[in-house]
Image (spheres, coloured by chain):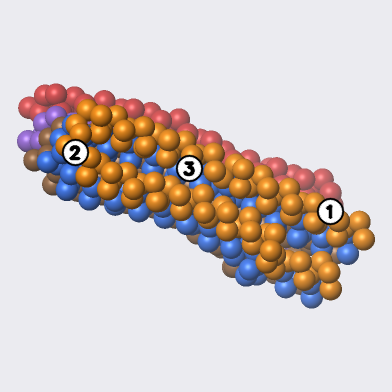
Chain colours: A blue, B orange, C brown, D purple, E red
């Protein structure tokens, strides 16, 4: 039984820390993009339209990076295809 | 029984530290975005409308990153799909 | 049975952390490119067209880098060609 | 059987982390090139043509670096020529 | 059998990480060269011809560095001349 427990421990550890590490840099990127956009709007309020359109595309792509990690985390927990090899 | 205890320890450890690490950088990003927005409003009070709209979208997306980590943490604690393999 | 368990543990660990590490630098790159584009639009709103076209090409290529890592992660989990050697 | 398992573990670990590490610096390079191009277009919108042509060549070459790593990762997983020595 | 397995493990590990590490500095170099060229074109658009010719020679030479690593990786995997000493 010990080997199966080890497998489950590694799975839990990986799922949790992967998402924790995976949001770090998308968060930094979104924070940076956002702060530049706000700076720009403050300097030129009439450019709000193009600035916010561009910002939203960038934020969406950064968000997608974090979602990739979330998808892998949830697969590890809920649909781990390797479980069937451990518990035959 | 020792293996099951190990599994539970790893789960608790992962759930706790994942959310602790996971809020670090969304917090930095929101702090940065927020401080830039306040700077901008202070410089151009008439631009308050577009600045705060843009800020709120950015804060919401940064918030979502932390929520992903929270979801994985809560799943690990309350709906851990791997528990049934440990305690059959 | 222990060797097979080890193989599965390594697979899970690799799939999770590869994607977590793999989004770090595309995220930094997208954040940087995005913030420069917003700066540029704020300085010259009439150049919004060429700036955002150029930005979107760059964001797409950075996104593709993260997708390469995602593909390898998902292959490791769902279509790992080495599994058949472990479980003959 | 232990030696063969070790070989497969090393293969999986290498394939996953090689691609994760391999996209780091192409991503940094693309982010840097992209941000400079956007800076340039913002300063001289009339130079958009030559700037974006030059940028796209650079992005393509940086992309190719990441693709080299992807190719080696996929060879390790799907067409590993050394497997036949392990499983004779 | 253990020694042969070790040899194959080292080969796989080396082939994978060599290409991952080997693209680091060509990528940094290309990113830097590219960003300087774009800076130059933005400052002096009429010098686009000589700047991009010079840039392309530089990018090609940097690319060749990464290709050397790729060649060694592929030789290690597909045409390793040392294999015949291990498997006599």
Residue that numbered label 3 is attached to: B26
Mark 2 Cα shell of 10 Å, populated few (<14), some (14-19), many (≥20): some
Give the mark, 1 or 2, whose residue is nearer the N terminus: 1
Residue C20, x across and y down, in percent: 55, 48
Splitting the image into 4 quarters, where does residue D32 fall?
top left
Using the image as rendered, state which of residue C66 and residue A52 is in the foreground. Answer: A52
Using the image as rendered, state which of residue E82 and residue D3 is in the foreground. Answer: D3
Give the mark, 2 or 3, whose residue is nearer the N terminus: 3
Using the image as rendered, state which of residue C63 and residue A43 is in the foreground. Answer: A43
Residue A17, x across and y down, in percent: 63, 48
Q: Are marks 1 and 2 on the same chain?
A: yes
C-alpha gap between disc 3 and disc 1: 31 Å
Splitting the image into 4 quarters, where does residue C25 fall?
top left
Asked whether, in this view, residue D14 is left or right of residue A38, the answer is right
Single out the residue that lies furthest toward the bottom.
A88
Disc 3 versus disc 1: nearer the observer:
3
Residue that numbered label 1 is attached to: B6
Give the structural element (helix, strand or loop) at label 3: helix
The chain holding disc 2 is B
The chain holding disc 1 is B
Mark 1 Cα shell of 10 Å, populated few (<14), some (14-19), many (≥20): some
Q: Are marks 2 and 3 on the same chain?
A: yes
Asked whether, in this view, residue B17 is left or right of residue D31, the answer is right
Residue drawn at the location 26% of the way across and 25% of the way down = E36
Q: How many marks overall?
A: 3
Residue drawn at the location 77% of the way across and 71% of the way down = B84
Residue C37, x across and y down, in percent: 24, 39
Residue that numbered label 2 is attached to: B47
């Amino acid at each position: 039984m010990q080997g199966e427990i080890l497998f489950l421990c590694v799975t839990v550890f990986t799922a949790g820390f992967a998402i924790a590490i995976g949001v770090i840099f998308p968060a930094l990127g979104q924070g940076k993009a956002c702060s530049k956009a706000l700076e720009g709007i403050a300097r030129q309020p009439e450019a709000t339209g193009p600035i916010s359109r561009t910002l939203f595309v960038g934020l969406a792509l950064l968000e997608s990076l974090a979602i990739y990690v979330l998808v892998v985390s949830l697969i590890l927990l809920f649909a781990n295809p390797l479980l069937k090899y451990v518990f035959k």
